[in-house]
Amino acid sequence: MKKNKILVVGGAGYIGSHMVKDLLDAGYPVMVLDDLSTGHRELLTGGDFVEGNLGDSDLLDRLFSTHRISTVMHFAAFSLVGESMENPLKYYHNNTASTTTLLRAMIRHGIKRFIFSSTASVYGEPVQVPITETHPCNPNNPYGASKLAVERMLQDCDAAYALKTISLRYFNAAGADASGTIGELHTPETHLIPLILKVASGERENIKVFGTDYPTPDGTCIRDYIHVSDLTRAHLLALENLLKGGESAVYNLGNNRGYSVRDVIKMARDVTGKPIPAIEAHRRPGDPATLIAGSDKIKESLGWKPRYEDLETIIETAWQWHQKNPTGRSAP
Ligand code: UDP
């Protein structure tokens, strides 16, 4: 089965590009489909590349008729909670409607395995932490809702077309490949750890702490940070499972440990040795106070074991990448 390609949709993005590298390292032939709206060609370490959008039905038909694809991995989503509150239709269009186009093309061409990048945002404000997969799903922002809609479609597609799917609900992806050759590159950057590192490197003056009155011990939001290479490792295990004939499933991916915004800033000061000034700011709409994953299910079912669990290592790998990649390179 390894001679059939893995199609990585969104393979030029942050998590997608790490996936491409790890698939190639594991010996899988890879094809990337990415419209480069937020991805970067220079993050691709190999494989075939097609520039295009996942909502382009004709392009998908051409691609699926000319290449033998065993499995589709789908990373091509908009993923900013704040932006999704301001422009929900952008999210429902790309993340939900275009994914329907992709799934329909797969079914037309008899491709029956799909690995989906889902998110902890499907849960909404937690009623209990750690959050396990049985926690109710009540997303409190359009981003989470646009992803949950796909998860629901996937259940129906399994029942109707025997499409086997694994949805991975990521908590906060962070860090960079240990090689230092690829890493997080968003334009504009909105994520906490890369923004903090921009302050450390002198590209920004300070980091804003969004909300200091949350019901958490230090008043700032708590998140469960997971290293991007631990995420991609989980995808490889999911892929092996589907290729062996495994059933559809949904898994959380996090480290069962929460860090507040202030904890992250403090750790980044320790790792970088820089002062990193922080200023208090208003809450960002759509942010739940605490998100911590219960990830036992994937450990038990697929044998997933994180290798970079501690925040220090996560920030160290991000810092290693950041220092090699001045901001100028990320300008479109
Ligand atoms: N955050 C912050 N200042 C920033 C960016 C983010 O305080 O400049 C907070 C944000 O409110 C959230 C946490 O950091 O509580 C992680 O945000 P990020 O955007 O990195 O990921 P998200 O949780 O939205 O997926």
Image (cartoon, rainbow, N blue to C red):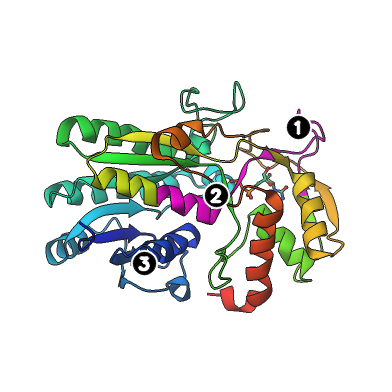
First in residue order: circle 3 vs circle 2: 3
Tell whether position 255 is magenta: no
- The picture places residue 218, in percent across and down from the top left corner, at 82, 35
Tell whether position 210 is magenta: yes
Q: Which residue is mark 1?
A: 214
- Does 188 sit left or right of 247 as displayed? right
Q: Quadrant of residue 274?
A: bottom right
Q: What is the three-letter code of the residue carrying label 3?
A: Leu
- The picture places residue 287, in percent across and down from the top left corner, at 63, 38
Given residues 246 and 90, the one toward you in this image is 246
Q: Which residue is mark 2?
A: 80
Q: Quadrant of residue 159?
A: top left
Disc 2 within 8 angstroms of ligand 1 (CB): yes
**Residue shown at 69%/57% (left/top)?**
315
Magenta segment boundaries in residue numbering = 209-235
- The picture places residue 129, in percent across and down from the top left corner, at 62, 26
What whole-number distance in Å separates the C-alpha atoms at marks 1 and 3? Answer: 43 Å
Q: What is the three-letter code of the residue carrying label 1?
A: Tyr
Quadrant that contains the N terminus: bottom left
Q: Which residue is mark 3?
A: 24
First in residue order: circle 1 vs circle 3: 3
Disc number at residue 129?
none
Q: What is the three-letter code of the residue carrying label 2?
A: Leu
Residue 96 visible to the viewer: yes
**Residue shown at 57%/73% (left/top)?**
330
Helix, strand or loop at label 2? It is: loop
Helix, strand or loop at label 3? It is: helix
